[in-house]
Image (cartoon, coloured by chain):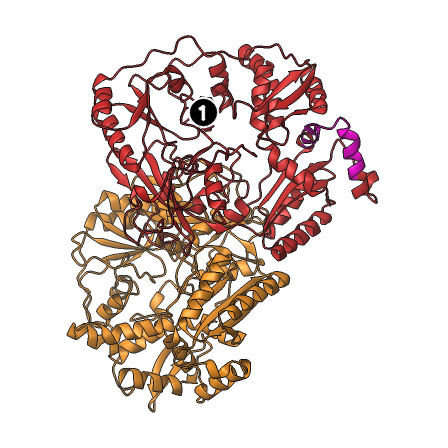
Chain colours: A orange, B red
Amino acid sequence: MAAKRNTVTTDVPESSVAPAEGTALTLDPRLSLRVDSVIPKKRHEALKWFGWGYNDSQFYGQNGIICFRGDKYPLGGCELPSFTKWVEKKFELTVDPRKPYPQLPQTYPRPVENAPFLSELRGITKVEHSLEGIDRLIRCHGQTLNDIYSLWHNKFQRIPDVVVWPRSHEDVVQLVQLAHKHNVMMVPYGGGTSVSGAITCPQEEKRTICALDTSQMNRLLWLNRKNLTVCFEAGIVGQDLERVLREQGLTVGHEPDSYEFSTLGGWVATRASGMKKNVYGNIEDLVVRVRMVTPSGTLERECSAPRVSCGPDFNHVILGSEGTLGVITEVVLKVRPLPAVKRYGSLAFPNFEQGVLFMREVALRRCQPASVRLMDNEQFMFGQALKPEKSWWASLVDGLKQRYVTAWKGIDLSEICAATLLFEGDLKDVQRQESIIYEIAAKFKGFPAGGQNGERGYILTFVIAYIRDFGLHQGIVAESFETSVPWDRCSLLCRSVKQRVVSTLP
Amino acid sequence: MAAKRNTVTTDVPESSVAPAEGTALTLDPRLSLRVDSVIPKKRHEALKWFGWGYNDSQFYGQNGIICFRGDKYPLGGCELPSFTKWVEKKFELTVDPRKPYPQLPQTYPRPVENAPFLSELRGITKVEHSLEGIDRLIRCHGQTLNDIYSLWHNKFQRIPDVVVWPRSHEDVVQLVQLAHKHNVMMVPYGGGTSVSGAITCPQEEKRTICALDTSQMNRLLWLNRKNLTVCFEAGIVGQDLERVLREQGLTVGHEPDSYEFSTLGGWVATRASGMKKNVYGNIEDLVVRVRMVTPSGTLERECSAPRVSCGPDFNHVILGSEGTLGVITEVVLKVRPLPAVKRYGSLAFPNFEQGVLFMREVALRRCQPASVRLMDNEQFMFGQALKPEKSWWASLVDGLKQRYVTAWKGIDLSEICAATLLFEGDLKDVQRQESIIYEIAAKFKGFPAGGQNGERGYILTFVIAYIRDFGLHQGIVAESFETSVPWDRCSLLCRSVKQRVVSTLP
């Protein structure tokens, strides 16, 4: 989350204004520079080749205690004694630090060659490409459990045969035409965080597979402060996009769990939902225009009015198309000024049922704050266990008692559940929202459990996928895969690490 | 607007609960009764065959004064001396009450026969149909100026050859199959208020044209209070739909200008926008599911989750498809509890430019009330002239002076413009919204001009189309059509009657 930021060499140039209505999306490329991304072109130099996230961020065991390393997250450098106990009890295992991590394979699957394609790729285009094994392997999959398990156990027979890095819409047009001409399968690859299977190479594919990596297409093409719209190339990574806008006092406000690594194009292609969608909307509410290259031409709508007021809206066919229809190259998004106030909160409820009733009332009254997520007792206890302090249980109970003196005796700790809250807006709006939310909570026996717990819950979202890999490393997941028994232990872990979220109606 | 309401014989039956996930949209038809609509099956018994709206609502001249008849609108029964002067000055004409209204034609265009289709229609289906001239004529057009002009001057050579009134989704399936089998052109017809040309019969069409009138498909099929969703048949008229829901303490909140006469299916087919979209959203934000009959089957999505979270959303292809893809038969919509408070307001600005700056700031701060519409000086003066009082000008000036004592001398009445406001929500929310809006207005030299002006502006929307017909009757529009000169006078009228609305970004 608090990712170490590379220097941003690109400020938004003064000249980067929106084009007049009806002109093409792109301006002269010289108007805008590439954003210096947190993710390098050689992804594996910064990101794990065998799992989720940064190379230097990882759960590991030391002297029987689970620890987290790295400086990207608040948990970094912490020992987690309570979490250790939780894992030991839940899975009846002792953390074994000696278990091996997977090693890069000695050899990679042999490429399916398509000499005419490669020859034209080299001769006609100026697009960079790679045939190296590691470049190909790390782009053969998304981030499902199955993807990562297959990777650890060397199960991928088909991986991309070639990787290309276009640097503009025009490059993509050339590449798609070339692939079409030579019957090459092309898979657009953004942040690689897909959990839909769309970027996992089909293992039966006979054609040459070309992974089109969009990472070098990450320019801010223009910004229109008056209309509050911005145009980015599709390969920009979520946290880069927000950083560039933040420097302008603006935000898009789209924060899917994968936001550190996933790309704008991926958000559109997978119809992504953000944690703050109650205020900012999901990706389909934020997209104004999309430019997509298909084998039969570029699909784009000239009009950049905020709404399609007549005729079908084909953006909604592109949204969620998972790369099957073409390559998204540029996207116009709505932006907003940064909120004046950003405040976390949390609520505790005596049981899950009361929590659900609270969520229903919030939905009924349409007063959702930017984020409101309900978790059940198991998630709540799990979140508490992830605190670095040894005495998490005592401090939890004390804290709750303190806050809930009068009704404390009615609380059963094995039933209690919690909701995390995030409020964003003007101070007065946030205050009004808070008062409504806490009033509704009281109606269902909920009580405020502090902003720190809320922030914690919100930010823990970003380390959850690291826990998945820790589970793999300790063999919790592997066992279920190997034996083909019902995935009890596996699903328990998954259920535990992925909050049981009750979303409110929009 | 305040349409005389027929008795509603249909209360929502107790048993009308939402079906379980994954079941078809419709329940047993006996669960729900047809809504007794304000618009009868024989439309021309209540609505003008030659123009907009109710038979008994009309502008007319009497003793040189323009009056408005009927009891459906606040203007009903009023003499409009100021409006008379405005018209006389603007168009250099004297109102002539003796000008004739169009007469129903003696003969109607001869039907293009398709005996096998008619024979099967009669034999196989139980669907009512009509070959009568008047039934066919009134369904050959929408409500563009061109449509109505053509009607008045008997210019339609091709009108529907047959009109059918299906009573359920199943009827529509039968009809569409029949039309497909016999190469009959089918035009879905809802409220007949289209201004896109989609329901105007193509004058070169050689095939039999069948108008499919959806008015007899207007049941409330189910209501789910917990999920806040409702399923209606597509033929229900806007005001009927809101009335039925109001009795349940609910609202959809969709109010296009045509809301008195247009239908749910029409809203979806034309991608309608409502005057209160800032709070409730446009039709695409309100639709959860759509059921559409096409020649190759029924298109529907089983899932009724509030959001399509993966894959393209084909609702957005149906939205705005203008009846070209199929016949919409049933729609699931989001509903909300009726707002506790509904308050009108208005603002006056020294000039249009300040008004635009105000609207931009409102958009920037995302604090739009349910409705906020800016009109220019001409619209403002026009709206004032439509007041029944003789002394409108004096009372306007006095009112403004009173409200704006200190800065009054800076105001030029030929520059002044206004915005109408509508706030809906909880009392505290409305108060907070009002304080923000009036604070922003003050920044741009705007000042409150009273709730009455706001309500007036909002409700005048509903009589504007009657003015169009008055213009036709007095020959203002006709002249421009006949002489083919640039439509100066015509467009002036249109610009005058249709407020120049600056909409804020969503």
Crowd around label 1: few <14 · some 14–19 · many ≥20 (10 Å): many
Q: Is residue B251 magenta?
A: no
Q: Is residue B12 above or below residue A458?
A: above
Q: Residue at x 16, y 53 (%)?
A: A206
Q: Position of residue B489 (x, y in %)?
A: 62, 18
Q: Residue furthest bottom?
A: A63
Q: Residue at x 57, y 17 (%)?
A: B472
Is residue B262 visible to the viewer in this orientation of the structure? Answer: yes
* Residue under pointer 1: B142
Q: Is residue A77 above or below residue A433?
A: below
Q: Number of labelled discs?
A: 1
Q: Is residue B385 magenta?
A: yes
The stretch in magenta equals B380-400
Q: Position of residue B138 (x, y in %)?
A: 42, 20
Left/right of residue B493 with respect to residue A303 in the rendered view: right
- In this view, the residue in front, B244 or B143, is B244
Label 1 marks a residue whose chain is B
Q: Residue furthest top?
A: B106
Q: Position of residue B71 (x, y in %)?
A: 59, 28
* Amino acid identity at mark 1: Gly
- In this view, the residue in front, A201 or A180, is A201
Q: Is residue B155 above or below residue B47?
A: above
- In this view, the residue in front, B452 or A283, is B452
